[in-house]
Image: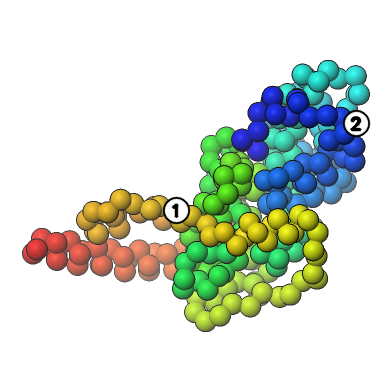
């Protein structure tokens, strides 16, 4: 998580890790978007290929995550390791949530609408999914993707807004809808989310309060020329491992052609006024 400093984590007591590092991390305020990664997945070094080049003190950070860190580690070093452990867990998390078991865990969170709802009225409170705009750490914070309007939004909570988008990756929500095509939202009409078992833990109560807050739309421009604003607006393009989703890419080409015609008309009207 981007907003937590070495001083913050080094000031914690040993009781913070009384259960396990992962349990402590998931229960920390602001980490509600994350799901628990299976220990078997973390212990399989094949799944972690290449992460040793991304994380300093990789071995010790991994030991901290798996609760195998030597107790004699000084508090100052433990605080620095905690920052690296957060980075490592986040990068593992991005890989985990595109596996079959990881998608199933994120499905449960989606059914409970733990990532919030789309603020656009015509989307009729469509549940959102987290997405990264970059797979490289420290470049972009996490955004929320709406499968109905196919746009992205910034979380309203600053705690969620400071989460690195690389911890969810650029492919997750689009792969999610490919694996669960029955959840692809319709473009018109009410939405239906399959029910899930009620779970009234303190964490879910906090999640419910969070998702009742509307998200902040991306790409809000200053007032001015309508045509200029339309041309400057960035278009989010769903991709899976860098490749555009075929049907969405086809639809977007048609939408952009319509937009270009509308921009031409607006420019003509502005020239007459």
Quadrant of the drawing holding the N terminus:
top right
Residue 14 rendering spot, x and y as whole percentages: 86, 30
Does 92 appear above or below 253? above
Mark toward the viewer: 1 or 2: 1
The quadrant in which residue 176 appears is bottom right
Q: Secondary structure at mark 1?
A: loop
Q: Earlier in the sequence, mark 1 or mark 2?
A: 2
Question: From the image, which quarter does the C terminus lie in?
Answer: bottom left
Query: Is disc 2 surrounded by few (<14), some (14 to 19) or many (20+) residues within 10 Å?
Result: few
Q: 35 or 239, which is in the foreground?
A: 35
Q: Nearer the viewer, residue 223 or 201?
A: 201
With 157 as the anchor, is 61 left or right in this view?
Answer: right
Up-down relation of residue 84 to residue 251 (above or below): above
Instruction: Kindly tell me whether residue 96 is visible in this rendering.
Output: yes
Left or right of 255 on screen, residue 85: right
Query: In this rendering, would 20 be left or right of 113?
Result: right
Q: Residue furthest bottom?
A: 189
Q: Which residue is mark 1?
A: 218
Left or right, 178 with reference to 257: right
Residue 223: x, y in percent?
27, 54
Q: Residue at x 57, y 44 (%)?
A: 158
- Residue 89 in the image: state x and y as whole percent: 74, 39
Residue 68 is marked as 2
Q: Residue at x 73, y 24 (%)?
A: 80
């Amino acid at each position: 998580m981007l907003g937590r400093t070495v001083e913050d984590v080094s000031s914690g007591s040993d009781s913070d890790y009384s259960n396990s590092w992962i349990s402590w991390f998931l229960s920390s305020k602001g980490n509600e978007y994350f799901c628990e990664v299976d220990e078997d997945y973390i212990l399989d070094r094949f799944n972690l290929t290449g992460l040793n080049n991304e994380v300093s003190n990789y071995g010790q950070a991994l030991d901290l995550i798996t609760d195998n860190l030597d107790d004699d580690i000084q508090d100052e070093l433990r605080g620095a390791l905690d920052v690296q452990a957060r980075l490592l867990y986040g990068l593992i998390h991005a890989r985990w949530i595109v596996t079959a078991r990881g998608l199933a865990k994120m499905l449960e969170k989606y059914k409970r609408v733990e990532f919030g709802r789309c603020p656009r009225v015509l989307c009729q409170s469509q549940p959102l999914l987290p997405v990264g705009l970059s797979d490289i750490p420290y470049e972009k914070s996490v955004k929320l993707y709406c499968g109905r309007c196919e746009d992205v939004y910034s979380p309203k909570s600053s705690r969620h807004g400071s989460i690195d988008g690389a911890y969810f990756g650029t492919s997750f929500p689009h792969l999610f809808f490919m694996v669960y095509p029955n959840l692809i939202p319709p473009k018109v009409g009410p939405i239906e989310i399959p029910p899930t078992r009620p779970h009234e833990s303190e964490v879910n109560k906090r999640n419910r309060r969070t998702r009742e807050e509307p998200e902040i739309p991306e790409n809000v421009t200053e007032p001015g020329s309508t045509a200029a604003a339309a041309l400057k607006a960035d278009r989010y393009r769903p991709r899976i491992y860098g490749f555009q989703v075929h049907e969405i890419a086809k639809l977007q080409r048609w939408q952009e052609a319509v937009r270009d015609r509308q921009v031409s008309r607006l420019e003509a009207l502005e020239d007459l006024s």
